[in-house]
Image (tube, rainbow, N blue to C red):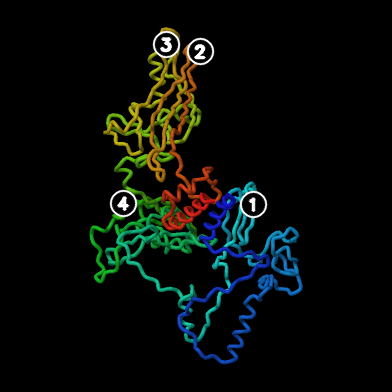
């Protein structure tokens, strides 16, 4: 049974050698490279006859590049100063021999790239190796953290043999080699122009149409330029790019510019032209469809500029465009609003103008906004469903003076814990208050005017479906024969969880509770007319995450304790299809040898 001792190490070694050819042990192999067989064929064969001088030059070049037999460090790319130790050049013989082998007496903290021997190794945990009887180069290296030692066998990796036989470049095969290995150059590639879209995209200039002259143009938004911020009127307005700009106009002669300069007249910003709903491309007849034009409607029509002495009245100082759009269907409605002013000058005057362009969608006014689709989105309002209607959960909000606002309430947003406090003005005298009536007044102040109903499970719940809402449990003040108990604090607790796929989980509401903290009316006092009320909202995550999937195999996994495990796997055919037959045969022969011995 003496042969049983190296059995496992033999199996592991053969598996290592199967993945790559092991390299025999050689202590003086630093930066040595073997000449790989040249099976490559050049794009075109080189001429068979060369001048004698060319052959001599080729032989001399090979002698310079190829390593000399027996040399310990034939190639050292960072040894640039003969007879002098180059900094961090570990292969420089002038720096000592320890640097090339990684010895402790090397003076450098790191080695330059290319100055150490590139090594390709396959490593196993040293505890799995019982005996090292291989003639190949091996190393024992510390593993991650330094707690585990790794037994490594070096492979003869052909990718590390960077001294390949170079191809001969001739006049004939030069174009083919350039085309095969060439990369980017300074020549710009041919640009393929994409076909223009039939609708506006973000940043596209908004087209305008002047019906009197049948001219297509673009909408302009003046902008200031330079340190003087003088107005430039040729700045195009971009689709879906809401911007605010301002600039300064210098009027050299206010008397003549007051009624003749179109930049001062509000009518020039909306009369005589219309916006195009969708983009129009060049046509031979230069006609525009009637349904594709959108007129600009002023909110109020200001009067035209007029001159009174040295003062010009009704001068435009601010222009605000509001543009409604509907996706690819383009612009639907445009309105403009003006602010006018009076300026004086004799004759020179200065005017600062402001321009704003805002885009808005018509969709929110037509449909109710979801809080998610389907799961709730962080920051979206919680939805309450009641009798086919959809409302938002709100809580008390304080005013500037600290009192509870009667008109404005704070919307509870998903996964945002909040706490509010305010002073509630009691609308009657406490000594004359009826207990049940006072309780209902405070409940209505906490909950609002709507009925709680059910809380929507998802952000896109349908109010008409009862199965898409969950009940809200309420724990209020008990009505008893003793002292009157009134609510002074409300705690809203919401339990939610992620459901669905791990790649795209959706947040859903599992349940909610309104928990009131009550206090006796007698302890508050009859002379108090301001009652402090507090509301807190807390979200609790009850997600049950599944067990994470198993990761990929790692090099440092422990081997099974069962000695016969490799035999069971090989004989049962559980191995990989690529190497199961040789492995099964090897294990079977080894097992038979053990039985015979």
Label 1 – label 4 distance at C-alpha: 65 Å
Label 3, on which residue? 432
For the residues bearing labels 2 and 3, Cβ distance under 8 angstroms: no
Query: Would residue 120 be found to the left or right of residue 301 on screen?
Result: right
Q: Closer to the camera, 47 or 491?
A: 47
Mark with earlier residue (4, 2): 4
- The residue drawn where x is 33% and y is 26% is 451
For the residues labelled 1 and 3, say whether their Cβ atoms are less than 8 Å apart: no
- Residue 306: x percent and y percent? 39, 56
Do we see residue 317 in this rendering? no
- Among numbered discs 1 and 4, the one appearing first in the sequence: 1
Which mark is drawn over residue 303? Answer: none
> Which callout, 4 or 3, points at the residue further toward the start of the chain?
4
Residue 326 badge? 4
Q: Residue 64: percent from the left, percent from the top?
A: 64, 79
Q: Residue at x 30, y 59 (%)?
A: 278
Looking at the rendered image, the disc whose residue lies closer to the viewer, 1 or 3, is 1
- Callout 4: 10 Å neighbours few (<14), some, many (20+)? some
The one of 478 and 317 positioned closer to us in this rendering: 478
Q: Report how many numbered discs are placed on residues in the image.
A: 4
Q: CA distance from mark 4 to mark 2?
A: 59 Å
Is the residue under label 4 in contact with that under label 1 (CB below 8 Å)?
no
Reading the chain from its start, which is encountered first: label 1 or label 3? 1
**Disc 2 to disc 3, C-alpha distance:** 16 Å
Classify residue 268 by image quadrant.
Answer: bottom left
Q: Which mark is residue 142?
A: 1
Residue with the mark numbered 2 = 523
């Amino acid at each position: 049974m003496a042969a049983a001792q190296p059995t496992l190490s033999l199996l592991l070694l053969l598996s290592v050698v199967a993945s790559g050819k092991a390299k025999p042990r050689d202590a003086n192999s630093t930066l040595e490279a073997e000449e790989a067989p040249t099976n490559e064929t050049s794009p075109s064969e080189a001429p068979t006859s060369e001048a004698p001088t060319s052959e001599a030059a080729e032989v001399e070049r090979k002698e310079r590049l190829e390593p000399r037999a027996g040399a310990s460090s034939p190639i050292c790319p960072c040894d640039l100063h003969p007879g002098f130790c180059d900094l961090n050049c570990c292969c420089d013989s002038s720096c000592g021999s320890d640097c090339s082998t990684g010895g402790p007496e090397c003076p450098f903290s790191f080695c330059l790239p290319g100055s150490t021997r590139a090594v390709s190794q396959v490593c196993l945990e040293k505890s799995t190796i019982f005996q090292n009887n291989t003639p190949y180069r091996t190393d024992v290296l510390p593993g991650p953290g330094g707690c585990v030692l790794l037994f490594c066998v070096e492979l003869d990796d052909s990718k590390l043999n960077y001294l390949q036989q170079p191809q001969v470049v001739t006049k004939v095969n030069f174009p083919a080699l350039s085309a095969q290995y060439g990369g980017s150059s300074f020549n710009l590639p041919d640009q393929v122009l994409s076909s223009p879209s039939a609708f506006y995209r973000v940043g596209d200039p908004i087209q305008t149409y002047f019906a009197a002259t049948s001219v297509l143009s673009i909408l302009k938004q003046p902008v200031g330029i330079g340190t003087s911020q003088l107005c430039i009127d040729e700045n195009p307005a971009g689709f879906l790019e809401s911007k605010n700009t301002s600039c300064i106009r210098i009027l050299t002669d206010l008397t003549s510019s007051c009624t003749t300069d179109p930049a001062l007249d509000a009518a020039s910003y909306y009369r005589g032209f219309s916006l195009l709903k969708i983009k129009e491309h060049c046509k031979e007849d230069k006609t525009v469809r009637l349904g594709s034009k959108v007129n600009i409607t002023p909110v109020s029509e200001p009067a035209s500029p007029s001159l009174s002495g040295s003062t010009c009245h009704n001068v435009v100082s601010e222009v605000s465009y509001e543009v409604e759009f509907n996706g690819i269907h383009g612009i639907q409605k445009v309105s403009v609003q003006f602010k006018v002013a009076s300026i004086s000058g004799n004759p020179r005057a200065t005017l600062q103008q402001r321009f704003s362009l805002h885009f808005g969608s018509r969709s929110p006014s037509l449909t109710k906004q979801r809080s998610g689709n389907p799961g709730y989105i962080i920051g979206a309002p919680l939805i309450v469903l009641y009798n086919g209607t959809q409302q938002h959960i709100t809580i008390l909000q304080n005013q500037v003076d600290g009192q509870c606002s009667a008109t404005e309430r704070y919307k509870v947003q998903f996964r945002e814990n909040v706490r509010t406090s305010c002073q509630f003005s009691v609308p009657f005298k406490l000594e004359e208050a009826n207990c049940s009536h006072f309780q209902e007044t405070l409940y209505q102040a906490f909950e609002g005017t709507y009925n709680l109903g059910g809380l929507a499970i998802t952000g896109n719940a349908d109010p008409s479906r009862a199965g898409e809402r969950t009940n809200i449990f309420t724990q209020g003040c008990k009505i008893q024969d003793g002292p009157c108990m009134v609510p002074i604090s409300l705690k809203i607790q919401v339990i939610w969880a992620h459901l669905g796929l791990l790649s795209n989980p959706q947040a859903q509401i599992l349940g909610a509770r309104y928990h009131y903290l009550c206090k006796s009316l007698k302890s508050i006092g009859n002379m108090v007319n301001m009652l402090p009320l507090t509301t807190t909202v807390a979200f609790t995550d009850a997600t049950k995450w599944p067990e994470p999937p198993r990761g990929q195999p790692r090099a440092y996994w422990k081997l099974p304790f069962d000695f016969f495990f490799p035999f069971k796997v090989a004989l049962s055919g559980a191995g990989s299809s690529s190497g199961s037959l040789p492995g099964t045969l090897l294990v079977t022969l080894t097992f038979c040898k053990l039985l015979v011995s």
